[in-house]
Image (cartoon, rainbow, N blue to C red):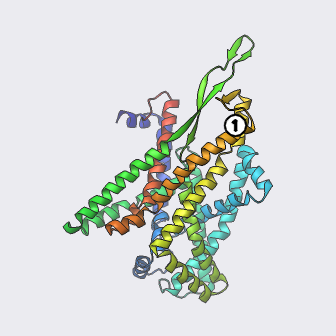
Amino acid sequence: MPKITNIFRIPDLRKKILFVLFWLVVFRLLAVIPVPDVDLSRLANFFQGNQLFGFLNIFSGGGLSNLSIVMLGVGPYITATIVMQLLTMIFPKLKEMYYEEGSAGRAKFNRYSKYLTIPLAFLSGYGFLNLLISQQVLPQMSTLFLLRDTLIVVAGSMALVWIGDIISEKHLGNGISLIIFAGIVSHLPTTVQQLFVSFDSTTLISYLAFLVIAVIVIAGVVYVNEAERKVPITYAKRVRGTKMFGGVSSYLPLKVNQAGVIPIIFAISVLMFPQFIAQAAAVFSKSTSLYLIDVVSKVFNNQYWHALFYFVLVVLFTYFYTAVTFDPREISKNLQRSGGVILGIRPGDITSTYLGKIITRITLWGAIFLGVIAILPNITTMVTGITIVSLGGTALLIVVSVALEVLRQINSQLIMREYEGFE
């Protein structure tokens, strides 16, 4: 408690926390404002019969099940970010902008991602609204009114991207991740209430098993997120004027889960992509769109196929994002410039090769761990018979990872102000 009260003793930090909480409350208010003419009872029945949409609803903060003006959530922006990251592997200028132009280049790169978000959100919103009209959740409407509702949900999605940006500026965690975090946490009270209402003494063992699994997952996420390989580094002595610098030993921390929670979010977006293509087909042919949506729903409602795709995507994206964010050559150059060497390893290309081998090996275990956590809801359902999407492995992973990141940010600001941080 003394450490928690320290947060609110610092006026600047207190204002930042209240600012972030205010915008998360605004997000929750937007998530309960529905688009016009929606039949909520038919909408509830539609989501109960579709595992894929029920899963996506968690990450829109319940906006999808309410058919709110922010029903797309930050999904289109994440998809646009993935597309832009992939384009850096094709176009050298984009890669140079992202990696070599510093903060100005990354700001420009993010701006292009936001431009791409608008057409992706429009296609996704238009296709999804057409699907709901075909399911009689929404009444038949003219093209003009359909475009009106589509523009509303596009504006809602872009508003969330803007809210995420201004939250990120306070350096208390990533704004987009916090919005997803708030959406998941908002379901917990309802889920816990449903568990108590539907409790049956014959299923007590299953509930206890689920609780044990949840605790193990949380402990595992914390352990893997904090785990790191320490590579010993020695700095050469240097004389500047009358003073001597260097001659000390340190270490380079290489995290087991270098990519954090990003591979999970990327994998979810890719799983959404076939649904997005099926919805976007409504622009050209509504009957074709409905057929594709039916095929995609059947595939992803199969737990085995869904778990297999999900696991493979998480593993691949863990390696991909680690390769994007961790460049052994750049690390080697920085060490050489500062006079640092890894014991027993020559500077230059040999050092970068050595670091590349280490990061590849430790990323394997981080990727497998993330993949197992991602498909944990499927495993839990098969073992215990309890299906709770909002308390699944992916949701727990995102919640715990985002909470740890926020904790680190607050901790660094407390230490910077000479307060004792959290241990």
Q: Which residue is mark 1?
A: 351
- Write down the quadrant of residue 320 in the picture: bottom right
Name the residue rendered at 52%, 85% in the picture.
Answer: 133
Q: Say which of 156 and 276 sits in front.
A: 276
Name the residue rendered at 56%, 57% in the picture.
Answer: 263
- Write down the quadrant of residue 333 in the picture: top right
Decide: is 73 above or below 23: below
- In the image as oriented, which residue stretches furthest toward the top? 242
Q: For this view, does 312 lie left or right of residue 4? A: right
Name the residue rendered at 55%, 60% in the picture.
Answer: 314
Name the residue rendered at 31%, 55% in the picture.
Answer: 212
Amino acid of disc 1: Thr
Q: Looking at the picture, how far across and down is residue 155, in whole percent?
A: 60, 67
Q: Say which of 16 and 178 sits in front.
A: 178
Quadrant assignment for the C terminus: top left
- In the image as oriented, which residue stretches furthest toward the left? 201
Is residue 291 something one can see in this rendering? Answer: yes
Q: Say which of 26 and 321 sits in front.
A: 321
Q: Looking at the picture, how far across and down is residue 84, in whole percent?
A: 69, 60
Q: Secondary structure at mark 1?
A: helix
Is residue 258 something one can see in this rendering? Answer: no
Q: Count numbered badges in the picture.
A: 1
Decide: is 262 above or below 154: above
Category of crowding for the residue at label 1, using alpha-carbon neighbours closer than 10 angstroms: few (below 14), some (14–19), many (at least 20)? many
Q: Looking at the picture, how far across and down is residue 376, in whole percent?
A: 42, 61
